[in-house]
Image (cartoon, rainbow, N blue to C red):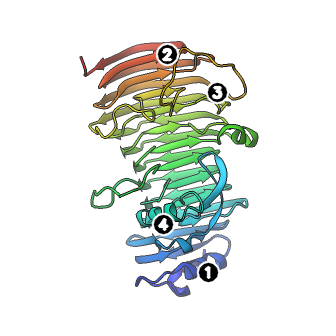
Amino acid sequence: MKVYNITDYGAVSNGEICTEAIQRAIDICECGGTVYIPEGNFISGALFLKSNMTLYVDKGARLMGSGNIDDFPVMGYSFEGREQLCYASLINTDSAPHENIVIDGEGVIDANGVELFTAEMKENHGKRGRAVCIRNTKNLKIRNVTIRQSPSWCLHLIYCNDVFIENIEVHTKYDENGEKYKHIFNGDGIDVDSCKNVKIVGSIIASQDDCIAIKSGRDIEGRRIGIASEDIIIENCSFKSGFGIAIGSEMSGGVKNVFVRNCDFQDTHSIGSIKAVRGRGSYIKNIHYENCSLINRNTEISDTKWFRGAIYVDGFYGYDEFNPELKEKISEETPEVDGIYFKNISVDTVAGNAVYLCGLPEKPFKNIYLENVKARGKYGMVTKNIDNLQLINVDVKSKVN
Protein backbone atom coordinates (compact mmCIF):
# COMPACT_ATOMS: atom_id res chain seq x y z
CA MET A 1 0.00 0.00 0.00
CA LYS A 2 1.53 3.30 -1.08
CA VAL A 3 1.43 6.28 1.29
CA TYR A 4 1.12 9.83 0.01
CA ASN A 5 2.28 12.28 2.68
CA ILE A 6 0.63 15.63 1.94
CA THR A 7 3.82 17.48 2.90
CA ASP A 8 5.56 15.84 -0.07
CA TYR A 9 3.09 17.67 -2.32
CA GLY A 10 3.51 21.11 -0.80
CA ALA A 11 1.26 21.11 2.26
CA VAL A 12 2.65 23.10 5.18
CA SER A 13 1.38 23.68 8.70
CA ASN A 14 2.33 27.36 8.91
CA GLY A 15 -1.10 28.90 8.30
CA GLU A 16 -1.01 28.76 4.51
CA ILE A 17 -3.99 27.27 2.71
CA CYS A 18 -3.06 23.79 1.46
CA THR A 19 -6.09 22.82 -0.61
CA GLU A 20 -4.19 22.30 -3.88
CA ALA A 21 -1.43 20.25 -2.26
CA ILE A 22 -3.81 17.95 -0.39
CA GLN A 23 -6.09 17.53 -3.40
CA ARG A 24 -3.04 16.72 -5.56
CA ALA A 25 -2.13 13.88 -3.19
CA ILE A 26 -5.70 12.58 -3.38
CA ASP A 27 -5.84 12.80 -7.16
CA ILE A 28 -2.62 10.85 -7.77
CA CYS A 29 -3.28 8.29 -5.01
CA GLU A 30 -3.21 4.84 -6.58
CA CYS A 31 -5.89 2.22 -5.94
CA GLY A 32 -5.60 1.06 -2.31
CA GLY A 33 -3.27 3.91 -1.35
CA THR A 34 -3.33 6.18 1.70
CA VAL A 35 -3.23 9.97 1.75
CA TYR A 36 -1.47 10.78 5.00
CA ILE A 37 -1.94 13.95 7.07
CA PRO A 38 0.88 14.12 9.64
CA GLU A 39 1.05 15.97 12.94
CA GLY A 40 0.39 19.68 12.49
CA ASN A 41 -2.38 22.13 11.66
CA PHE A 42 -3.22 22.05 7.94
CA ILE A 43 -5.71 24.55 6.55
CA SER A 44 -7.78 23.64 3.53
CA GLY A 45 -10.82 24.40 1.46
CA ALA A 46 -13.15 21.74 0.07
CA LEU A 47 -11.49 18.38 -0.65
CA PHE A 48 -12.94 15.59 -2.78
CA LEU A 49 -12.13 11.95 -2.07
CA LYS A 50 -12.29 9.16 -4.65
CA SER A 51 -12.79 5.39 -4.70
CA ASN A 52 -10.32 2.88 -3.29
CA MET A 53 -8.38 5.19 -0.98
CA THR A 54 -7.78 5.95 2.68
CA LEU A 55 -7.53 9.42 4.18
CA TYR A 56 -5.46 9.02 7.34
CA VAL A 57 -5.40 11.91 9.81
CA ASP A 58 -2.66 11.03 12.27
CA LYS A 59 -2.60 11.74 16.00
CA GLY A 60 -1.72 15.39 16.55
CA ALA A 61 -2.94 16.36 13.06
CA ARG A 62 -5.74 18.82 12.48
CA LEU A 63 -7.35 19.35 9.09
CA MET A 64 -8.94 22.78 9.44
CA GLY A 65 -11.44 24.53 7.19
CA SER A 66 -10.02 27.73 5.76
CA GLY A 67 -12.89 29.98 6.77
CA ASN A 68 -12.75 31.60 3.31
CA ILE A 69 -16.08 31.13 1.58
CA ASP A 70 -14.39 31.15 -1.84
CA ASP A 71 -12.70 27.86 -0.95
CA PHE A 72 -16.07 26.08 -0.72
CA PRO A 73 -17.87 26.12 -4.09
CA VAL A 74 -21.65 26.00 -4.32
CA MET A 75 -22.78 22.63 -5.73
CA GLY A 76 -25.83 20.40 -5.89
CA TYR A 77 -26.37 18.22 -2.81
CA SER A 78 -29.27 16.60 -1.05
CA PHE A 79 -29.96 18.52 2.16
CA GLU A 80 -32.99 18.56 4.45
CA GLY A 81 -34.66 16.09 2.14
CA ARG A 82 -34.34 17.99 -1.13
CA GLU A 83 -31.79 18.34 -3.92
CA GLN A 84 -30.58 21.93 -3.69
CA LEU A 85 -27.54 24.15 -3.88
CA CYS A 86 -25.19 23.90 -0.91
CA TYR A 87 -21.73 25.11 -0.07
CA ALA A 88 -19.25 22.27 -0.35
CA SER A 89 -18.12 20.60 2.85
CA LEU A 90 -14.54 20.34 4.07
CA ILE A 91 -14.40 16.66 3.00
CA ASN A 92 -16.65 15.50 0.16
CA THR A 93 -17.23 13.04 -2.59
CA ASP A 94 -18.76 14.22 -5.84
CA SER A 95 -22.10 12.83 -6.98
CA ALA A 96 -20.63 9.95 -9.04
CA PRO A 97 -20.74 6.41 -7.60
CA HIS A 98 -17.78 5.56 -5.34
CA GLU A 99 -16.59 2.53 -3.40
CA ASN A 100 -14.07 1.49 -0.77
CA ILE A 101 -13.33 4.80 0.96
CA VAL A 102 -11.76 4.90 4.44
CA ILE A 103 -11.30 7.88 6.77
CA ASP A 104 -9.11 6.89 9.72
CA GLY A 105 -6.59 8.13 12.27
CA GLU A 106 -6.59 9.74 15.70
CA GLY A 107 -6.50 13.32 14.43
CA VAL A 108 -9.13 16.06 14.13
CA ILE A 109 -11.24 17.21 11.21
CA ASP A 110 -12.39 20.73 12.13
CA ALA A 111 -14.62 22.52 9.62
CA ASN A 112 -14.13 25.98 11.17
CA GLY A 113 -17.90 26.20 11.28
CA VAL A 114 -18.34 29.41 13.26
CA GLU A 115 -16.45 31.41 10.68
CA LEU A 116 -18.01 29.63 7.70
CA PHE A 117 -21.50 29.83 9.17
CA THR A 118 -21.32 33.61 9.27
CA ALA A 119 -19.90 33.90 5.75
CA GLU A 120 -22.29 31.41 4.17
CA MET A 121 -25.36 32.88 5.81
CA LYS A 122 -24.33 36.38 4.72
CA GLU A 123 -23.63 35.47 1.08
CA ASN A 124 -26.56 33.02 0.98
CA HIS A 125 -25.81 31.40 -2.38
CA GLY A 126 -26.70 27.96 -1.00
CA LYS A 127 -27.36 25.97 2.14
CA ARG A 128 -24.54 25.70 4.64
CA GLY A 129 -21.93 23.01 4.12
CA ARG A 130 -21.07 20.15 6.44
CA ALA A 131 -17.75 19.04 7.90
CA VAL A 132 -17.84 15.71 6.04
CA CYS A 133 -20.36 14.84 3.31
CA ILE A 134 -19.98 11.45 1.63
CA ARG A 135 -22.37 10.63 -1.22
CA ASN A 136 -23.28 7.57 -3.24
CA THR A 137 -20.54 5.38 -1.76
CA LYS A 138 -20.49 1.62 -1.19
CA ASN A 139 -18.23 0.19 1.50
CA LEU A 140 -17.38 3.27 3.55
CA LYS A 141 -15.43 3.10 6.80
CA ILE A 142 -14.87 6.00 9.21
CA ARG A 143 -12.82 5.19 12.31
CA ASN A 144 -11.11 6.85 15.28
CA VAL A 145 -11.17 10.47 14.05
CA THR A 146 -12.73 13.45 15.79
CA ILE A 147 -15.01 15.58 13.61
CA ARG A 148 -16.05 18.95 14.94
CA GLN A 149 -17.34 22.48 14.43
CA SER A 150 -19.41 22.17 11.27
CA PRO A 151 -21.37 25.15 9.92
CA SER A 152 -24.35 22.76 9.80
CA TRP A 153 -24.67 18.98 10.10
CA CYS A 154 -21.31 17.47 10.98
CA LEU A 155 -21.16 14.09 9.21
CA HIS A 156 -23.69 13.62 6.39
CA LEU A 157 -24.04 10.31 4.54
CA ILE A 158 -26.21 10.36 1.39
CA TYR A 159 -27.19 7.30 -0.71
CA CYS A 160 -24.46 5.16 0.87
CA ASN A 161 -24.47 1.39 1.37
CA ASP A 162 -22.41 -0.81 3.68
CA VAL A 163 -21.14 1.83 6.11
CA PHE A 164 -19.13 1.11 9.25
CA ILE A 165 -18.41 3.90 11.73
CA GLU A 166 -16.36 3.04 14.80
CA ASN A 167 -14.82 4.89 17.73
CA ILE A 168 -15.26 8.41 16.36
CA GLU A 169 -16.10 11.59 18.23
CA VAL A 170 -18.44 14.24 16.85
CA HIS A 171 -18.70 17.67 18.47
CA THR A 172 -21.05 20.30 17.07
CA LYS A 173 -21.92 22.24 20.23
CA TYR A 174 -18.79 22.74 22.35
CA ASP A 175 -15.11 23.33 21.59
CA GLU A 176 -12.25 21.47 23.28
CA ASN A 177 -12.45 23.85 26.25
CA GLY A 178 -16.15 23.31 26.82
CA GLU A 179 -17.15 26.68 25.37
CA LYS A 180 -20.30 26.73 23.25
CA TYR A 181 -19.77 27.47 19.56
CA LYS A 182 -21.42 30.77 18.69
CA HIS A 183 -24.15 31.16 16.07
CA ILE A 184 -24.32 27.55 14.84
CA PHE A 185 -27.83 26.08 14.69
CA ASN A 186 -29.27 22.92 13.13
CA GLY A 187 -25.96 21.33 14.01
CA ASP A 188 -26.74 17.60 13.86
CA GLY A 189 -24.02 15.13 14.72
CA ILE A 190 -24.47 12.36 12.12
CA ASP A 191 -27.17 12.29 9.43
CA VAL A 192 -27.86 8.97 7.73
CA ASP A 193 -29.77 9.94 4.59
CA SER A 194 -31.26 7.23 2.33
CA CYS A 195 -28.54 4.73 3.30
CA LYS A 196 -28.61 0.96 3.73
CA ASN A 197 -26.67 -1.38 5.99
CA VAL A 198 -25.11 1.15 8.36
CA LYS A 199 -23.42 0.33 11.66
CA ILE A 200 -22.30 2.99 14.17
CA VAL A 201 -20.51 1.63 17.24
CA GLY A 202 -18.45 2.82 20.20
CA SER A 203 -18.67 6.51 19.37
CA ILE A 204 -19.21 9.75 21.30
CA ILE A 205 -21.51 12.47 19.99
CA ALA A 206 -22.06 15.89 21.56
CA SER A 207 -24.49 17.68 19.30
CA GLN A 208 -26.17 21.04 19.05
CA ASP A 209 -29.26 19.36 17.52
CA ASP A 210 -30.07 15.72 16.71
CA CYS A 211 -27.18 13.50 17.75
CA ILE A 212 -27.97 11.02 14.99
CA ALA A 213 -30.78 11.68 12.50
CA ILE A 214 -32.02 9.04 10.09
CA LYS A 215 -33.68 10.50 7.01
CA SER A 216 -34.80 9.60 3.48
CA GLY A 217 -36.07 12.60 1.54
CA ARG A 218 -38.89 15.06 1.87
CA ASP A 219 -42.44 15.13 0.52
CA ILE A 220 -43.08 14.56 -3.20
CA GLU A 221 -39.39 14.62 -4.17
CA GLY A 222 -38.49 12.12 -1.48
CA ARG A 223 -41.30 9.80 -2.52
CA ARG A 224 -40.29 10.09 -6.19
CA ILE A 225 -36.65 9.19 -5.49
CA GLY A 226 -37.85 6.51 -3.08
CA ILE A 227 -34.57 5.42 -1.49
CA ALA A 228 -35.18 4.19 2.05
CA SER A 229 -32.86 4.26 5.03
CA GLU A 230 -32.86 0.70 6.31
CA ASP A 231 -30.93 -1.92 8.24
CA ILE A 232 -29.18 0.45 10.64
CA ILE A 233 -27.50 -0.51 13.94
CA ILE A 234 -26.34 2.01 16.56
CA GLU A 235 -24.79 0.44 19.64
CA ASN A 236 -22.47 1.09 22.58
CA CYS A 237 -22.41 4.85 21.90
CA SER A 238 -22.43 7.79 24.32
CA PHE A 239 -24.34 11.01 23.71
CA LYS A 240 -23.37 14.13 25.63
CA SER A 241 -25.76 16.85 24.37
CA GLY A 242 -28.45 17.37 21.77
CA PHE A 243 -31.64 15.48 20.92
CA GLY A 244 -30.76 11.81 20.89
CA ILE A 245 -31.42 9.51 17.94
CA ALA A 246 -34.15 10.85 15.68
CA ILE A 247 -36.08 9.26 12.82
CA GLY A 248 -37.33 11.93 10.38
CA SER A 249 -38.88 14.28 9.95
CA GLU A 250 -37.60 13.93 6.36
CA MET A 251 -38.58 10.28 5.83
CA SER A 252 -40.50 10.27 2.54
CA GLY A 253 -38.39 7.47 1.06
CA GLY A 254 -39.15 5.30 4.08
CA VAL A 255 -37.21 4.18 7.17
CA LYS A 256 -37.21 0.64 8.52
CA ASN A 257 -35.21 -1.80 10.61
CA VAL A 258 -33.33 0.53 12.96
CA PHE A 259 -31.80 -0.92 16.14
CA VAL A 260 -30.41 1.30 18.92
CA ARG A 261 -28.80 -0.77 21.66
CA ASN A 262 -26.75 -0.28 24.82
CA CYS A 263 -26.37 3.49 24.52
CA ASP A 264 -25.94 6.11 27.23
CA PHE A 265 -27.46 9.61 27.01
CA GLN A 266 -26.20 12.41 29.29
CA ASP A 267 -27.81 15.86 29.17
CA THR A 268 -29.56 15.10 25.92
CA HIS A 269 -33.21 16.08 25.65
CA SER A 270 -34.37 12.70 24.36
CA ILE A 271 -33.35 9.12 23.79
CA GLY A 272 -35.41 8.63 20.66
CA SER A 273 -37.85 10.56 18.53
CA ILE A 274 -40.07 9.41 15.67
CA LYS A 275 -41.17 12.40 13.56
CA ALA A 276 -43.68 11.63 10.78
CA VAL A 277 -45.88 14.54 9.76
CA ARG A 278 -48.51 15.19 7.11
CA GLY A 279 -47.05 15.78 3.68
CA ARG A 280 -44.24 13.25 4.02
CA GLY A 281 -46.12 10.07 3.19
CA SER A 282 -44.22 6.75 3.16
CA TYR A 283 -43.45 4.85 6.37
CA ILE A 284 -41.39 4.39 9.53
CA LYS A 285 -41.37 0.72 10.56
CA ASN A 286 -39.63 -1.62 12.95
CA ILE A 287 -37.65 0.79 15.11
CA HIS A 288 -36.07 -0.57 18.31
CA TYR A 289 -34.49 1.25 21.26
CA GLU A 290 -33.18 -1.25 23.82
CA ASN A 291 -31.02 -1.13 26.96
CA CYS A 292 -30.60 2.65 26.97
CA SER A 293 -30.54 5.21 29.77
CA LEU A 294 -30.94 8.99 29.87
CA ILE A 295 -30.11 11.47 32.62
CA ASN A 296 -30.81 15.06 31.57
CA ARG A 297 -30.17 18.13 33.70
CA ASN A 298 -30.22 20.56 30.76
CA THR A 299 -33.05 23.10 31.01
CA GLU A 300 -32.22 25.07 27.83
CA ILE A 301 -35.31 23.57 26.18
CA SER A 302 -38.36 22.25 27.99
CA ASP A 303 -41.34 21.79 25.67
CA THR A 304 -41.54 23.20 22.14
CA LYS A 305 -42.84 22.21 18.72
CA TRP A 306 -39.39 20.72 18.09
CA PHE A 307 -39.21 18.73 21.30
CA ARG A 308 -42.02 17.16 23.30
CA GLY A 309 -40.46 14.41 25.40
CA ALA A 310 -37.55 12.19 26.33
CA ILE A 311 -39.29 9.32 24.52
CA TYR A 312 -41.46 10.72 21.78
CA VAL A 313 -43.38 9.74 18.71
CA ASP A 314 -44.93 12.75 17.02
CA GLY A 315 -47.26 13.23 14.07
CA PHE A 316 -47.35 17.01 14.61
CA TYR A 317 -43.64 17.74 14.83
CA GLY A 318 -42.96 21.41 14.04
CA TYR A 319 -46.60 22.52 14.33
CA ASP A 320 -47.14 25.72 16.33
CA GLU A 321 -50.77 24.80 16.83
CA PHE A 322 -52.71 21.63 16.04
CA ASN A 323 -55.88 19.75 16.89
CA PRO A 324 -55.05 16.06 17.48
CA GLU A 325 -58.73 15.16 17.00
CA LEU A 326 -59.26 16.86 13.62
CA LYS A 327 -58.96 14.36 10.78
CA GLU A 328 -57.72 15.10 7.30
CA LYS A 329 -58.25 13.06 4.14
CA ILE A 330 -55.84 10.12 3.81
CA SER A 331 -53.62 10.37 0.72
CA GLU A 332 -50.11 9.49 -0.46
CA GLU A 333 -48.97 12.36 1.77
CA THR A 334 -50.15 10.58 4.92
CA PRO A 335 -47.27 8.81 6.70
CA GLU A 336 -47.49 5.36 8.26
CA VAL A 337 -45.82 4.51 11.58
CA ASP A 338 -45.90 0.85 12.57
CA GLY A 339 -43.76 -1.04 15.07
CA ILE A 340 -41.89 1.20 17.54
CA TYR A 341 -40.25 -0.54 20.48
CA PHE A 342 -38.72 0.87 23.67
CA LYS A 343 -37.39 -1.91 25.92
CA ASN A 344 -35.28 -1.75 29.07
CA ILE A 345 -35.20 2.04 29.14
CA SER A 346 -34.43 4.41 32.03
CA VAL A 347 -35.25 8.13 31.76
CA ASP A 348 -34.68 10.90 34.31
CA THR A 349 -35.13 14.40 32.86
CA VAL A 350 -35.94 17.90 34.05
CA ALA A 351 -37.25 18.91 30.61
CA GLY A 352 -40.61 18.21 29.00
CA ASN A 353 -42.63 15.01 29.08
CA ALA A 354 -41.12 11.74 30.12
CA VAL A 355 -43.10 10.03 27.32
CA TYR A 356 -45.04 11.67 24.48
CA LEU A 357 -46.86 9.55 21.88
CA CYS A 358 -49.14 11.34 19.43
CA GLY A 359 -50.21 9.93 16.07
CA LEU A 360 -52.49 11.31 13.38
CA PRO A 361 -56.25 11.03 13.90
CA GLU A 362 -56.91 9.97 10.30
CA LYS A 363 -54.21 7.29 10.43
CA PRO A 364 -53.20 6.45 13.99
CA PHE A 365 -49.68 5.20 14.57
CA LYS A 366 -49.71 1.45 15.18
CA ASN A 367 -48.05 -1.08 17.43
CA ILE A 368 -46.03 0.94 19.90
CA TYR A 369 -44.50 -1.12 22.71
CA LEU A 370 -42.94 0.03 25.96
CA GLU A 371 -41.48 -2.74 28.10
CA ASN A 372 -39.45 -2.37 31.29
CA VAL A 373 -39.48 1.42 31.03
CA LYS A 374 -38.91 3.65 34.04
CA ALA A 375 -39.33 7.32 33.17
CA ARG A 376 -39.23 10.48 35.26
CA GLY A 377 -39.93 13.81 33.60
CA LYS A 378 -41.02 17.35 34.27
CA TYR A 379 -44.37 16.01 33.10
CA GLY A 380 -45.50 12.42 32.81
CA MET A 381 -46.96 10.59 29.80
CA VAL A 382 -49.15 11.81 26.92
CA THR A 383 -50.80 9.42 24.43
CA LYS A 384 -53.10 10.27 21.51
CA ASN A 385 -54.08 8.46 18.30
CA ILE A 386 -52.19 5.22 18.89
CA ASP A 387 -53.54 1.83 17.81
CA ASN A 388 -52.31 -1.08 19.92
CA LEU A 389 -50.21 0.66 22.55
CA GLN A 390 -48.77 -2.01 24.83
CA LEU A 391 -47.25 -1.17 28.20
CA ILE A 392 -45.44 -3.92 30.09
CA ASN A 393 -43.84 -3.05 33.42
CA VAL A 394 -43.90 0.68 32.72
CA ASP A 395 -43.44 3.23 35.51
CA VAL A 396 -43.85 6.90 34.52
CA LYS A 397 -43.90 9.77 37.00
CA SER A 398 -44.11 13.54 36.78
CA LYS A 399 -41.94 15.90 38.80
CA VAL A 400 -44.63 18.58 38.62
CA ASN A 401 -47.58 18.08 40.97
User: Percent position (x, y) of residue 352?
Assistant: 34, 28
Q: Secondary structure at mark 4?
A: helix
Disc 4 marks which residue? 119
User: Percent position (x, y) of residue 321?
Assistant: 48, 26
Residue 155 in the image: above or below residue 91: above
Disc 2 marks which residue? 384
Whether residue 38 appears in this view of the structure is: no
Q: Which mark is residue 78?
A: none
Nearest to N terminus: mark 1 or mark 2: 1
Nearest to N terminus: mark 2 or mark 3: 3
C-beta proximity under 8 Å, tags 4 and 2: no
Q: Nearer the viewer, mark 4 or mark 2?
A: 4
Position of residue 7 in the picture relative to residue 139 (left or right): left
Q: Nearer the viewer, residue 300 or 340?
A: 300
Position of residue 88 in the picture relative to residue 272 (left or right): right
Q: Give the CA distance from mark 3 to mark 1.
A: 47 Å
Structural crowding at the residue carrying mark 1, measured as other residues with C-alpha within 10 Å and reported as few (<14), some (14–19) or many (≥20):
some
